[in-house]
Every structure is written in C-alpha cells, then in structure tokens.
Amino acid sequence: MIVLVVLIGSMLILGIAGRVYAHYLAKNVGENSSRATPAITKADGRDYIATPTAVVFAHHFASIAGAGPIVGPVLAVIFGWLPALIWILVGGITIGAVHDYLATYMATREGGESVATIAKRLLGKNVFLALMIFLIVMLSLVCATFLNLSASALTSLLPFDRIELPQTQTLFRVVDGQVVIGGIASMSVIVITVVSPLIGWMYLKKKVAVWKCSLAAIGICVVSITIGILRPVALPAQTQLLGLTFSATELWVLLLSVYVLVAAGVPVWIFLQSRDFINVHILYVGVVALVVTLFVAGIRGEGVADTIPAINIEQGSEAMKGPIWPMLFIVIACGAVSGFHSLCAGGTTCKQLTSESSARRIGYYGMLLESFLAVCIIGAMIVGAGKMNYIMDVHPSLLSITKESNPVLGFAMAVGNSAKLAFGAPIAVGALAGMILLEGFLVTTLDTAVRLMRYLLEEIWRALFGRYDVFANPSDVPTNEAWGSGEKTPAGSAGLPIKPDFIGMNAVACKTIPTHGVWKLLLGLLRHYWFNSGLAVALMLFFAMTGSAKALWGIFAASNQLLAAFVLLIASLWLLRQGRKIWFALIPAIIMLATTLTSLIMMLKTYQQAHKTTLLTADIFLLVITVYLLISGLRAVFAGRMQPISPSASIAEMTPRSPEE
C-alpha cells in the first residue's frame, strides 16, 4: 500500500539528512563542545539549570510539537496528500531543522538570550523593541490558537454510529445523545500535572538516573490513563460562575488559563520541565504506536474506501480560500518550519544545555522527529480518513454546513479507523488514543508558550526601564559565585550594577536612576514574574475570544513562519558578522519571507470581508513591522556594521557599544 512507501521513504530521507546535513551545518557554524554554556555559567536554580540532554530533548520536543504537526497536515491534505508530504520533507530538512538548530546555537552562544536580544546587539534598540512587540503578538496568537484547540479536544462530541458503539456503552460520557471522547484525556492531563513536581524533584534535586525517572514517568502515564477511564472528567454543559454562564468549552479555557498562569511563574522544573518529561513518554509511545498501526495497515493493504486523493488542488484552493502557494505552505507550519521553535530554543531550551553539541542534537534532530510525526499524520489520513467524513469534520464549508471546523476530531477519527483496519480494534479505542496523544502535545506547548511570553515581557521592561535602580538592583545581579569562582562580587564589574543587556558577558558598569513612591511600586510590579505571567495569560485570552481555532490558524501560521524568516535573516547577519557561510540560512529566509508576506496580503481582504477587526489589525501590524525590520537590516548591512569578527567570538563577547552607534 502507498502508506508503506510514504513511511519508509520518509524515514530514509530524514535519517540521511540528520546524518549528513546536520554535521555539515555544525562544521560551518563553528560548533565547539568544550565551550561553556549558559546553564553552567549563569546557573540560578530557576531558569538556568544544567540538565541531561535526554531530559531537555523531551521538554523541547514536547514544547515545539504541539498541535502544529497534527492540525496543519490535517487541514492541508484537502490539497491532496502528495503536495503536503513533499512540503513537509523538503521544508523540514532544508528550512525548519536549519532554523531550529541555528536558533538554539545562537541563543546558547549569546548567553541564553532570546533572538530579539541577539537582534538588538546586531541592529540596535529600536529593532529590538519592534521585534519584541512582534513576538508578543505572535505568541499571543500561538497561545490563543492552542488554547482553543485544547478546549475543543476536551469537549469534542461524536454520534454513536461514527465510533460504532452501542448506546449502552459505559466507556465514554454521553451528552445530548452524543459521546464525549475528551473526558479520559482530561483526567490524564490533570493527574500528570499534579504528579509532575515529584519527577522534577527526583531527577533534579535527588539526581536520580534518567532511565529510572523514565520508568516512573511511564508508570504515571499508565495510571493517569487508567484513572481517566475509571473516572473521566465530566464538566456540565452549562456552569454558573460569578453570575455568568459558561459552556464546557469556555470553562476549560478558564481552567487551562489558570494552570498556565501558575506554570509560567513557578521555577521551570516544577511543572514545565517535569510535566513535559512525563508527557513526552505518551507522545513517544503514541508516535511509535501510530507508526506500527500504519505499517500493519499498509502490509494488509487496508484503507477506507473513499480515500483522500494524492492531488486535489482545486477543492483545496476553495476550502483554504487561496491558491496552493502560499496557502499549503502556510497551513503546514510546525511540520515543515516554525518560528515558535526559536522562542523555545532561546527561551527555555538554551538555558538547560550542557554543551553546544546538544544544540544540534536537540534543535536539528528534534525538528526532524517533528517532521516525521507530520508524515505519520499524512499516513493516518491516507489510511483512515474517508473523504466525505473528513470534509464534514474539517472543511464543512465545502458542503455548505455551518458548523465549526474540527481538525482535532478529523485526526482522532482517522486514527480510530486506522486502528480498526490494522488490528480490528473498535474505532472508539483508536480515536481515544489519538485524542490523548493530541491533548498531550497541546497542553505541553501551551504552558511553554505562556512562559516564553513572560520572558519577552520581562525583556521589554528591562530594555525600557533598565536604567532605574529597581531593575538594576545589585542583589539581583549575577555574581562571580554563579560563574564558579566562589567570589561574591558582581561578575564583570567592580561591585557595581551591571548593564542589563550584557549581564555576565563582558558587562559594563552603569549608573542607575533612583526611584521613589508610586513610580517605584509600578516598576517593581513590571519586573515581577507573576505580573508578567498574568499579563501573558490576559493577552492569550484576548485573542482566544476573537474566534475558533481555524479562524485563528491562518494568521497564527503566517506570523509563525514570518518569525522563522526573521530568525533565519538574523542568523545570516550573525554568521556574516563572524565571517562564516550564510547561504544555508539566507536562501530559506528569502523563501519564507516571500511566502508569508504573500499570505498576509491575501488575508487582508478575507478579514475585512468577515469583519474580523482584531485579526485585520494584527495582519496590518505584521506587514508594517516586517517592512521596518527589513529596512533596518538592509541599512545595517550597507552601513558596514556586519564586518567580520573572530569566528570564535559571539556578539555578546564583543565590547558593548551604544545600540544607536
């Protein structure tokens, strides 16, 4: 069957790329495993924590994967599965994995800082602020999209005949004569979240071997699913709260928002890192189980009768309201290229690496694994998604049906049908497995994204108000003790506050402006991580209220890949500054820039006609900020500011100068 050719061919192509192209990149960017990383030089026990590579890979992969490599391909196969497959393989190897590796490597070399801070060192403060605002808008769209998808996944309803279960069944809850397949996944999420601090305490505080922690994590996963089967979460269809009425979906939105608020503020190991480590075992097992299912179905030559065609350009263009380019290349974001990955790389991942080679193993190989996951989703759609049911679930507008698009349901049903064809299992069992897998990806990305937004907000306040003593408090400045010398004086200075932009990296002493009264209280609030966590959640909820997940997906995907283009352009300047080759970053950057700008221009009319003012405003903002950043970058190049320095040096290791020089 064709699915065997797809899977085997994809594994070979991705494996060869990881072996050959990744090492070529490492050689040309100057990777050096003996160079100390920020997790060691800036260890603080909260964000900078040296962690085993396997644990960081689990956290990174769980964070970057999210709904993207699942929902994107599910939406995009309306163009036909072959165009989607080609884009995933070509884009993943030559653009996505290159982007992820360079983003992780740059952030590690630059002291664990974000891509925006690297841009500031290259191009100045104004570019930094513009890029930071762009990142916050983009992350708000990411969080809002994944929040809505999570809530939809946990409350998805199916008629009994679709899952071939009698109405006397007791496995799933029943609401209004339909089956709720998200209750089991809901309880699994809750149990894993509650227990996750224990795993973090084991591997980080007690230094328990990673393999022992993995065994414990697998046990927790099994127990969480078992409890979910025995006691699935049953939120009422309507809930009265503070005089307001909330649907089950809206209540999940609020509950998930409370969780990510807490997860974004507490030390990274308590929920974020440890929860990802537990949950990634479900993801690993789920991916392996999906591969086995597809292989067995392929060997048996099984598949649904009304299959999705290999090429379906005309109907795809109608469904996605645009031609195959750029729409297909935008819809499939995370499986081929995703700017969000750079935020993970420069946010949490780079602060945990023990060596520069880990940047390649986690950045490049993590993206290849995500691309293979997207390939598996394509395989599941080939085998288990009947065309009419797929259109009814994912693109109902093609049938003039007014219900909301539900790609989560389309994926779950494809997995359920695939499991039935391969092993004769009830459709409900496979659909449940698909739902648990998807929900695991969704929540792990959601809590990471909100924490990353918190980091960005904190960086903006430091850039704007870093000259005030509230932000330059000597008690908060890293000392040489953190760098391993055992002395107590602030690193890089003679006991004076350090310029925030260059903490720990040839930092220079700077004068501070004293603050008093209300101004001091306000600045103190801005620098507090709980305030910034709350602001991040508020921005997420603001965009989440603008519409369904599919309504947000277009602009989310476009802004996501526009960020990837920016990061690749910044990487090109960064490499150029060190006198290294740049073609492997610059060419993908130009391709993605052209693709995303075209899609954003096309979406202007769509949002205007649909009267989606918030999304229209966001679209215009993205276009304006893109023009500004491109002009700034070109001015820097032609002004001669990209003259090569020593290839072994980072931008942060140079003598700091005024951003406006």
Image (cartoon, rainbow, N blue to C red):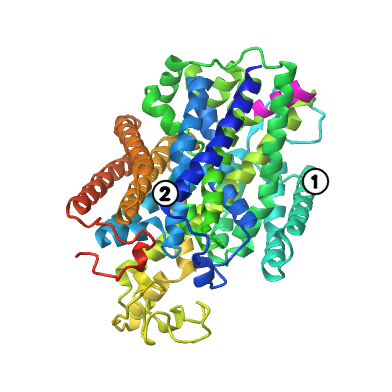
Residue extending furthest toward the left: 639
Horizontal and vertical percent for residue 366?
Answer: 56, 45
265 and 160: which one is in front?
Answer: 265
Mark 2 Cα-neighbour bin, 10 Å: few <14, some 14–19, many ≥20: few
> Which portion, as a residue range, is magenta?
413-423
Q: Determine which of the numbered discs, if any, sits on residue 226 in the image.
A: 1
Amino acid type, residue under disc 1 in the picture: Thr
Residue 64 position (above or below residue 514): above
Residue 466 position (above or below residue 406): below
Residue 562 position (above or below residue 327): below
User: Residue placed at 58% from the left, 45% from the top?
Assistant: 442
Q: Is residue 385 visible?
A: no
Amino acid type, residue under disc 2 in the picture: Asn
The N terminus lies in which quarter of the figure?
A: top right
Type of secondary structure dominating the magenta stretch: helix
Horizontal and vertical percent for residue 391?
Answer: 54, 20
Q: Determine which of the numbered discs, if any, sits on residue 28 in the image.
A: 2
Secondary element at image label 2: helix
Horizontal and vertical percent for residue 455?
Answer: 45, 62
20 and 540: which one is in front?
Answer: 20
Left or right, 9 with respect to 35, comes to: right
Horizontal and vertical percent for residue 389?
Answer: 60, 19
Left or right, 223 with respect to 36, comes to: right
189 and 362: which one is in front?
Answer: 362
Mark 1 Cα-neighbour bin, 10 Å: few <14, some 14–19, many ≥20: some
- Mark 2 and mark 1 lie on one chain; the one further toward the N terminus is 2
